[in-house]
Amino acid sequence: MDQQTTELSPYRTFSRSEWAALRADTPLTLTAAELEEMRGLNDRVNMDEVVAIYLPLSRLLNLYVAARQELFSATQQFLGGNHKNVPYIIGMAGSVAVGKSTTARILQSLLARWPNHPKVDLVPTDGFLLPNATLEREGLMNRKGFPESYDLPQLLRFLSNIKAGKSNVFAPVYSHLSYDVIPDKTITIDRPDILIVEGLNVLQTGKPPRDGKAIPYVSDYFDVSIYIDADEEVLRTWYIDRFFSLRETAFQDPRSYFHRYATLSDSETRQTANRIWETINLLNLRENVLPTRQRADLILHKGADHIINAVDMRKI
């Protein structure tokens, strides 16, 4: 990036060491055993990563939440109300295989250990995918994960209820084993201090209406957004590596939607994983996910070694 582009960028970029220095005196409250439980398949995040990247990030988000709580109190004083504080919502986006789920779990754990917001919930948007029967009927099974494969009105109602401060808001649950939404199963979100919403297309928008009417987007409900970034070929490698790992684990279960891949040879496994990546995940990345990167408040850049080597933070 040349100097002029850097000066005009809405972001300030930090190297890994510069970002790590912003930890200040934030204590390390996560143990190696806890991190091991949070780590996703083939995700190599370690305690050094927690110290260098996630502790400064949790400190920044803690400051953001505290400022939001003060703003809410000031607004209620102006309005003469005494309503309870509403949840602070963090949106997290990025490609398949980039490590969103692991990052979300680590942040959930770290943020819950700050005294002013001990209740932190996490909701993946997988649960808001349309059921497989609907996707098959509408010819969308090969576009699963694309924007049109989600029940957007249901997701928007969920977020609207959360931001309205309603108690006992229900979110659907997705099974990666059956590769489908689980009928009649939900999780209950009851006015957390912070809610992390993690998914491929959570920063997606559409064309604005010519008449100026309000069209809500998922990101309209976020207080801050994070995009996890990596190069296309790196993501391809991670996806294929994960596919190999799943062949030896989850795919072995006869109940798995992908059980038919459990007996593939190494060459067949690589060919199948690469085909799925090319025809579905890469297409979705290029058409829908990557174009939303510049809408994020924070961009975490990962290298081929899974290590975050730079952080972009939107200028205020």
Image (cartoon, grey):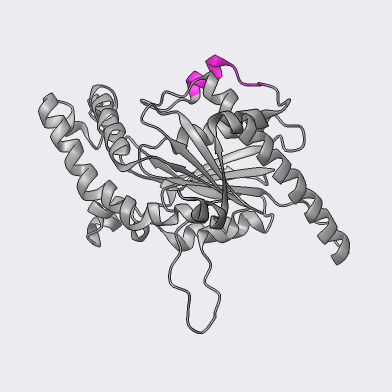
Magenta region? 28-37
Q: Quadrant of the C terminus?
A: bottom right
Residue 99 location in percent, x, y? 42, 35
Residue 29: in magenta span:
yes
Q: Residue at x 53, y 39 (%)?
A: 311
* Vertical relation: 232 (above or below) 142: above
Residue 236: in magenta span:
no
Residue 114 location in percent, x, y? 72, 31
Q: Quadrant of residue 261?
A: top left
Counting labels gives: 0
Q: Which residue is situated farthest in the front direction here?
A: 3
Residue 3 location in percent, x, y? 51, 51
Residue 143 location in percent, x, y? 27, 54
| Whether residue 231 is visible | yes
Q: Residue at x 16, y 31 (%)?
A: 270
| Whether residue 202 is visible | no
Does residue 19 appear to the left or right of 81 in the view shown? left
Magenta stretch: dominant secondary structure = helix
316 or 167: nearer the eye?
316
Q: Residue at x 48, y 32 (%)?
A: 309
Q: Residue at x 37, y 58 (%)?
A: 147
